[in-house]
Structures are given as structure tokens and as C-alpha cells.
Image: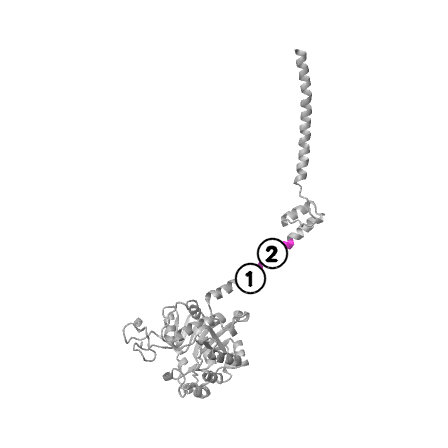
Amino acid sequence: MSMKSRGVFAKNFMPRNWTLLLCLGSFCAGMLFTNRMWMVPEDKGIVKTSTLEDAQTDLKFEDGDPKLKVVQRSSNESIGTLDKTIPKLEMKLTEAREAHESVMDGFPISENLKKDETNMKRKYFMVIGINTAFSSRKRRDSVRATWMPQGDKRKKLEEKGIVIHFVIGHSSTPGGILDKAVEAEEMMHGDFLRLQDHVEGYMELSAKTKTYFSTAVALWDAEFYIKVDDDVHVNLATLGTTLSGHRMKPRVYIGCMKSGPVLARKGVKYHEPQYWKFGEVGNHYFRHATGQLYAISKDVATYISTNQHILHKYANEDVSLGSWLIGLDVEHVDERRLCCGTPPDCEWKAQAGNICVASFDWKCSGICKSVERMADVHQRCGEDENALWSAGF
């Protein structure tokens, strides 16, 4: 039994050694096979990319390898491309934001006065809007023939920072004879600011005022925005000099301040349907600038533009404007040179060296028979012809 046992032991001992060697060999072969399987084959058609740090690290060990140089150059080119792309994306984002804000603000912009790059960058001193109507062609011509520069002179005026246009909306029948007449006049003179969403009408003057200031602020970045009627005579240089004295004030409202009775009786001129809001019958309005000519600073015009959809409209346009500003921290400036009378009043003041900014007749809320008399007022009360071009604002 002993020999048999030893024989069995000997017979079983040899296969175990071979088994150990076989396992060791299999393990080595497996490791070699695994390493080959995890190696990423390089495709000549694919450019290997890496971070700049990896490329520099690899370059320390294999500086002579041209493939690593390609990797480093590819990384540098990728970074350069990003440096060029990011500013372009920022510019596009800014343009998109501005376009979105323009749409959201809802500014109606005239076709011939769309905001361009020059207007957006340019700073102006004052924008003058001459309120006019479809029936006022002769009035406009009398203004063009006197105190409003024409042609190249008007362009030169803009170079001085003064923009001036007649302001008008559209008729109740778009594309009708009235609109076509204004379009023909615009082709001839090029001096209109058309309010796209405004329909002309005497009872719509308050709405027109809101739309004018909103449109003007959208088109021109100016220090002052002025509204004047087309039957008022204006000395532009004197107006600019007068406004210059208030340019350091952030919020200012300049005009001939007045306060008249609130007219409750129907059928009379300037009747106020909402008279009850002003207290007892016979009460007076708060102080506000007369509507023939007034000026507001940029911050005030921007406020009107921003809040135009909720600003209340009264029957009288000058009262409406005063109501929009009465509760604000806005300085009211009572400037009597903005409401001189026609000759001999403005003539005497001019001879005394106190030239008027604007002249009109109170009884007509403008120059009585302005078409016939505008030239005479200009001759007798107008400032020196070179005053505008020599003035520095």
C-alpha cells in the first residue's frame, strides 16, 4: 500500500507543475493581448487634438516628433479661432438685444428717418419738431421761406447739432390724397418726420405729442427736445443760447408758464370734459408751459417715451404735458422770451438788444394770418442772418 500510495503521489505531482507553468504563460499572453487591444489606432485622416498643456508636456519627452507639433499648432489655432469668434458672437448678441428693445418699445419710426448707425453714434444739441397739419401747406412754406434753413443749410445745421423737421402723422384713410400730398412735399423738401402710428386730428394733439417725443428720442440722442407750432416765429440762435444756460440740469421743462381756468361748459373753445378732476368748478389748472413752444431735457423726453402707454391725455395738449410732469422732480423754467408778441413788441425788444426766442399773438394762439405776416415778423424781429452760423452751443 505504501508503494502504491507513493506511486500515486508521484503520478499526480508532475501534472500540477505543468499546470502552474501553463497558468503563468497564459497570464503573460493575456497581458500582451490586452495592451494591444487598448491601443488606439492612429488614422491618417484624423487630426489628433489635445489641450495646450498636454501638448507641451508631451513635447518635453518627444520634442522631435512632428505629430506633436501638429497637435500643438492645432490647439493654438483652436484658441485663436475662439478668440475671433467670441467678439463676433458678442456683437451679434448686442445687435439682437437692441433690435428686441426697439420692437418692445414700439417706437413708430418714419420710413425716411429710420435710425441708422450715424444717428445712433452722433450726439445732438436740440431736436425741433414743428407741429403741422395736412391743411397747413402754406404755413409750412412761410416757415421755410423765413426762419427754417433749407437744403444744404439745413444739413449744415445738423452738423452743428440742431435737427429740425415738420411733424405729421397719417390721415384716417391711409394712402389717400392727403398722405400722397405730404409724400410729394417730402420728396421736394425732405423735411418731414412722419409719425407712423398716429392719425391726425385736432382732438388727438395730446397723443401726437407723446408720439413725437417717443419717436424723436428713438431717432436722435439730443440734450433738448422742442415742440413748436407752424404759425410761430422762432430765432434759432437765440433759442440755442437760451437752452445752453440749462444744459447742466438733469430734468428741465422750459416754456412760458401759465395757469388758466378749467372750462367746464360744453361748446366753448378749450372745453375740458374731465374738468371734475381739477376740483370745484371755476378752479384753475396747475402751472404748465403754453403750447406754442416749449422744450424738455433728454431725461424728461425719455420718461415720456418709456411711459407713453399709460400717460393720461386731457383735451388740451399743453395741459397734458404739464400733468405728466407735475408729480416729477422736474424743474419748471418760466422763460418769457419764448412768448413775445408780434411787432411792435418783439421789434422793440430786438432794438433794445433783448432778442426774442419766439413771437406770436395770444389772441390767435399763434401769429394771426401767419401765411401773410410771417415774412414781416421775420424781417422786423428776426436775429442777424449770421447769428446761427457763428453761435457755439
Q: Disc 2 designates what residue? A: 82
Q: What stretch is highlighted in magenta?
A: 76-94
Residue 83 forms part of the magenta stretch: yes
Q: Disc 1 designates what residue? A: 92
Tell me how far mark 2 sits from mark 1, CA to CA: 15 Å
Does residue 78 appear anywhere in the picture? yes
Does residue 393 appear anywhere in the picture? no
Residue at figure coordinates x 61%, y 59% from the top left? 84
**Which secondary structure class fits the magenta region best?**
helix
Q: What element carries label 2?
A: helix
Q: Label 1 amino acid? A: Lys
Q: How is the image coloured?
A: one colour
The answer to which of marks 2 and 1 sits earlier in the sequence is 2
- The answer to whether residue 212 is above or below residue 150 is above
Q: Label 2 amino acid? A: Leu
- The answer to whether residue 120 is above or below residue 345 is above
Q: Position of residue 85 (x, y in %)?
A: 59, 58
Nearer the observer, 316 or 227: 316
| Neighbourhood count class around disc 2 (C-alpha, 10 Å): few under 14, some 14–19, many 20 upward | few
